Amino acid sequence: MSLTNRFRVLLILTLLSAVAGAQSKPQPHGRLPLQKLATQNFGADAPWFLRNIPFLEIDDPEIQRIYYYRWKLFRAHIREIGPQGTTVLEFLDDVPWAREPFTDLNDSASFHLMEARWLRDPSVVDNLIDHLYTGGANDRHFSESIAAAAEAATFVTGDAAPALRHLDTMQHVFNLWDDHFNRARNLYWIEPLLDATEYTIASIDASGAGFADHPSSDPNRNGFTGGFAFRPSINSYQFANALAISHLAALAHKPEAAADYAARAERLRTAVLSQLWNPALQHFTDRYAQSTPTAQAGDFIRGRELVGYVPWLYELPPRSGDPATDASWAHLLAPNEFAGPFGLRTVEPSYPRYLTQYRYDAATGLPECQWNGPSWPFQTSQALGALANFLHDYPASPIITRDDYLRLLRQYTHQHFLSPGHPDLQEDYNSDTGTPIVGLPRSHHYLHSTYIDLVLTGLIGIRPQSANVFELDPLLDPVQRNPRPIHWFAIDHLRYHSHDLSIIYDEKGARYGLGPGLSVFVDGIRAAGPVPLGRMHFKLPPPRRSAYTAPRTDLAANPGFPEGPRSTASSSDLPDGASQAIDGRLWFFPENRNGWSPAPDSRLADEWLAVDLRKPMTLSSIELFFFADGRAFQAPHWFHLQFMSPSGWKDIPRQHREPAFPIANGENRITFPPTTMKQIRAVIPHIASTQTRLIELKAFATAQK
């Protein structure tokens, strides 16, 4: 039998064995078929997600589809960075304003923390907190709410230590913002560009670009920079950061620091409520911090912006509620205001420069980012998070309801589809047509927003907190007045405060066989329900103790350190192809090229990629990730994994491969007895009719459990 035919037979037997194994393990009563869901949504990469994520089944196919897409998206943005573990990226590809060599950005970090906290393995969120406070990633490139998000992450994991160990640095970073603090007003000011929101009303109007007939109008000053203002965003961020520092200081038995930062938060609350609430517009809006020929310091801007909902994202308005500020929520639903037919607008259409395009990409001529009306996942997710808080924690208001949250979440969900059936989240959209505006190569699979958290804390209603209790309040109307009601949902494999939770809602009781209503299982034991849909609160069992497992470090990863590992190849289709195979970035999206492929005109019998670790290291596992697109690229039929011995390249002895034969778009794990080596390589037999792409080679001292 030929090698190819043997491979096919063994592959079929392996797949049949896997299917039989999955079918031979019945799911506990009322739980989801995790293996089936993982395979359906992640294909060959299913094992990573089975180890890491809570699984969802819900009576809405689009929400379920995008929930799993967002986990796929998040996985793609995790970057191995060597000794510092991992970070999380905003863009898959390099952008010139990212921090080198890691290519991360601090403006998206709080979003990443809020999503990462739901991973079962806490190493990603813990590494990110460490990286932000010890690796310099919170470099104040943009405004941020990282201390608040770090604390919020501990509310899910139940472990405050990753945030507590950076308490001093949190205070240091908080105080660095004094360079943007106006003590007379007790408010922070910022240039919209450094608030990650260029071309807002403040920057456009302060530059004169909003007044075409004004004599000071300058085509070179069009609103990209300038517009210094006291904004609801940075002041809400600092309010939330101050509260987080206060809470952590109390845990650290530092009462003076706790009292100090609590007082700072309250002073900020008072200042925002008294100075940034615009009675004429019934909304929180910017006030100019500096005068220009077209803007007067102290004046409100001349329009509403979606950023005005950020105070509720951090519950800055008192929970007792206020009919005056509650009125702001009517603007979110008005079609001629924020409620675009295809997405929430960042600025209302009444603004004279609504959707006026000022800036274009020099290389392509395509439109660049602007915040004068486009629908932006960044602020859409902030507004939905704010709305979830308002519906959960504030007095009920007839202005906006739980049905509105579901409708707006569905609209945001649909925005993720670049074309029917093809999720590909972009930077921004025309809310009047639904089409992407920027559309640049960097925009594919963009991650500067939340979604998973909006489903889990918003729609499903998990309300994370530091105490060892579980609170649940699904944002569904028990009366089911929605024209497309949610009749059932289930969350399974959820890790919360070291416990495994399953949350199941079944309106009629027929789908899951647990009775009609809402049920919660903790570590496989029913803890509550079934009860009618509504708020639920109960104490959790004591935290479960588990042996600490140190996060693994990819010893081959090099995001760009001159002294780090380096790679070479027999041939390459791109000059930097070999380095891409160890740059710590791993995804299987065809829109964003990544990894090493042999040169298309190569005539070598074998192609290889070699990694010089730069010093001897003891390894016990290596992982290879190949790409397939169903057309040009596919996994190789075989590969040899070798190390440099005193007598030359030799196969690593006693290899155990999972799976037995190479797969694409998933993990090929090779384990072996601990072996000291300095150079390793993967050798791939050349087959003229196929193309191979090795996205990433990873090397570890220990194997994944």
Image (cartoon, helix red, strand yellow):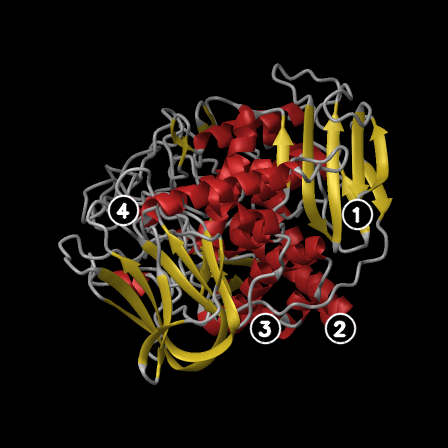
Q: Which mark is residue 169?
A: 3
Which quarter of the figure has residue 322?
top right
Q: Quadrant of the C terminus?
A: bottom right
Q: CA distance from mark 4 to mark 1?
A: 58 Å
x, y percentage for residue 175?
57, 70
Q: Which mark is residue 256?
A: 2
Instruction: Tell me whether the residue at label 1 lies in contact with that at label 3, contact meaning CB atoms closer than 8 angstroms.
Output: no
Dot 3: element: helix
x, y percentage for residue 620?
51, 71
- x 33%, y 43%: residue: 590
Say left or right for 167 vs 497: left
Amino acid marked by disc 1:
Asp
Which quarter of the figure has residue 166?
bottom right
Which of the two discs, 4 and 1, labels the residue nearer the N terminus? Answer: 4
Amino acid marked by disc 4:
Asn
Can residue 451 be seen from the camera position used here? no
Dot 2: element: helix
Q: CA distance from mark 2 to mark 4?
A: 46 Å
